[in-house]
């Protein structure tokens, strides 16, 4: 009796071919970066859900965080940091300004340049973000010791430095 190979054995799937091409170290590294990407997506989804309760969209809270971290950015600089087009960021800035959450001020040395600053009216939004952030930290970091968190953060900072574009 002759053994007959199944069609699956004769024709490996695309996934099988890709796995066969990848060595173990590639798979380990890809799992790390894929997991980081998925974690980032989960964090954004979680924050989006909670910010929607105060009528703040993803791009709005994301822009507000960038403005908070680097207050005084120009619109062009904000567009670069957010990896968005200048026109799209222009519309976003106008919406944030209409809500009175930010203001544009003339640059001290060049009156043609306008810099973006937070207004006091945005403080309640940051209070909400902070409260939700604390809940997120408690949930997402459950079972992670302070030492483990410091090591993870140090590793992520190294990865980020390596990923930054070189001048």
Image (cartoon, rainbow, N blue to C red):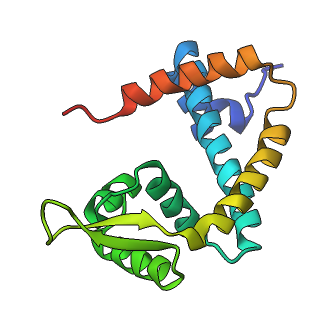
Q: Residue at position x 41%, y 75% from top?
A: 93
- 63 and 88: which one is in front? 63
Where is residue 25, by image quadrant? top right
- 165 and 153: which one is in front? 153
Question: How many numbered markers are drawn?
Answer: 0
Is 141 situated left or right of 126 in this image? right
Q: Is residue 14 above or below residue 125?
A: above
- Quarter of the picture holding the C terminus: top left
Q: Residue at position x 40%, y 55% from top?
A: 71
Q: Residue at position x 73%, y 49% from top?
A: 133
Is 146 situated left or right of 66 in this image? right
Q: Is residue 147 above or below residue 98?
A: above
Residue 6: image x %, image y %? Answer: 74, 33
Residue at far bottom of view? 98
Where is residue 38, by image quadrant? top right
Residue 81: image x %, image y %? Answer: 36, 52
- Quarter of the picture holding the N terminus: top right
- Asked if residue 29 shows in the view, the reply is no
Q: Residue at position x 34%, y 72% from top?
A: 104
Residue 57: image x %, image y %? Answer: 61, 72
Where is residue 84, by image quadrant? bottom left
Residue 18: image x %, image y %? Answer: 54, 31
- 6 and 162: which one is in front? 162
- Asked if residue 31 shows in the view, the reply is yes
Q: Is residue 91 above or below residue 109?
A: below
Is 120 situated left or right of 137 in this image? left
């Amino acid at each position: 009796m002759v053994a007959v190979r199944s069609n699956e054995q004769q024709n490996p799937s695309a996934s099988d071919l890709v796995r066969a091409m990848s060595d173990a170290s590639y798979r380990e590294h890809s799992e790390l970066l894929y997991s980081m990407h998925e974690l980032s997506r989960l964090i954004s989804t979680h924050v989006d859900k909670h910010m929607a309760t105060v009528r703040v969209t993803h791009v709005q809270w994301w822009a507000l965080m960038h403005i908070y971290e680097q207050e005084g950015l120009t619109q062009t600089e904000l567009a670069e940091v957010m990896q968005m087009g200048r026109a799209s960021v222009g519309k976003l800035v106008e919406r944030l300004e209409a809500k009175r959450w930010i203001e544009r001020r003339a640059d001290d040395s060049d009156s043609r340049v306008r810099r973006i600053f937070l207004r006091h009216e945005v403080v309640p939004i940051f209070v909400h973000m902070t409260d939700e952030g604390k809940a997120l930290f408690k949930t997402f970091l459950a079972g992670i010791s302070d030492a483990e968190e410091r090591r993870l953060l140090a590793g992520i900072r190294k990865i980020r430095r390596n990923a930054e574009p070189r001048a």
